[in-house]
Every structure is written in structure tokens, then in C-alpha cells.
Amino acid sequence: MKTVYDIMQLLKRFGIYIYTKDRLADLEMMEDEIKELYKMQLIEANDFQIAILVLRKEQNNYKKK
């Protein structure tokens, strides 16, 4: 998992689709959903950590623009 697209595909496996036309809001919602999947033990710790890092990096890049 290296991109936001990869995370979207992971979420899609669980029937979670996020698109609000607001990129920052989408990234924040994806982060919340990843946290919930981890709490319910549906994804492994490694996938959780990588996903959070990718999302936060993308959020920082978006805020800098």
C-alpha cells in the first residue's frame, strides 16, 4: 500500500466508498474509517500503520498547496 488509491481499494473491499469533492475531507474520512477497521480487528497493524502514514503525508502535501 503506497498511495491513496491503494487505501481506497482497501476500503472498497469492506464496502466503504468515500467521495465528497473535498479532497481534505475525503482524506480525513478515510483515516477515520481505517481507524475503525483496525479497532474492529478487520485489518492488521502493519496495514493500519502504513495507511495512516500515507493519508497523513497526503494531507500535509494538500495543505501546503
Image (cartoon, rainbow, N blue to C red):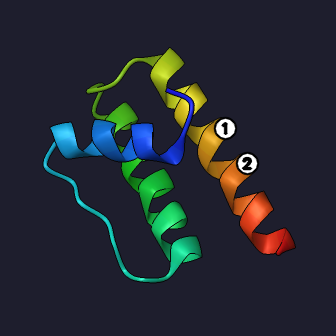
Pointer 1 local density, CA inside 10 Å: few below 14, some 14–19, many at least 20:
some
Instruction: From the image, tell me which residue sits under label 2.
Output: 57
* Left or right position of 59 against 16: right
The single residue placed furthest to the left in the displayed view is: 15
* Left or right position of 7 against 12: right
Compared to 1, does 56 lie above or below?
A: below
Q: Are marks 1 and 2 in contact (CB under 8 Å)?
A: yes
Task: Identify which residue is drawn at 31% across, 65% down.
Answer: 18
Task: Identify which residue is drawn at 43% across, 45% down.
Answer: 5
The single residue placed furthest to the bottom in the displayed view is: 21
* Left or right position of 49 against 47: right
Quadrant placement of the C terminus: bottom right
Closer-to-camera residue (30/62): 62
Where residue 64 sits: x, y (%)? 86, 70
Where residue 55 sits: x, y (%)? 60, 49
Q: CA distance from mark 1 to mark 2?
A: 6 Å
Task: Identify which residue is drawn at 37% across, 80% down.
Answer: 20
Pointer 2 local density, CA inside 10 Å: few below 14, some 14–19, many at least 20:
few
Where residue 59 sits: x, y (%)? 69, 61
Where disc 1 sits, the SS reads helix
Compared to 24, does 47 lie above or below?
A: above
The single residue placed furthest to the right in the displayed view is: 64
Q: Which mark is residue 53?
A: 1
* Left or right position of 18 against 44: left
Where disc 2 sits, the SS reads helix
* Type of amino acid under label 2: Lys
Where residue 32 sits: x, y (%)? 45, 56
* Type of amino acid under label 1: Leu
Q: Which mark is residue 9?
A: none
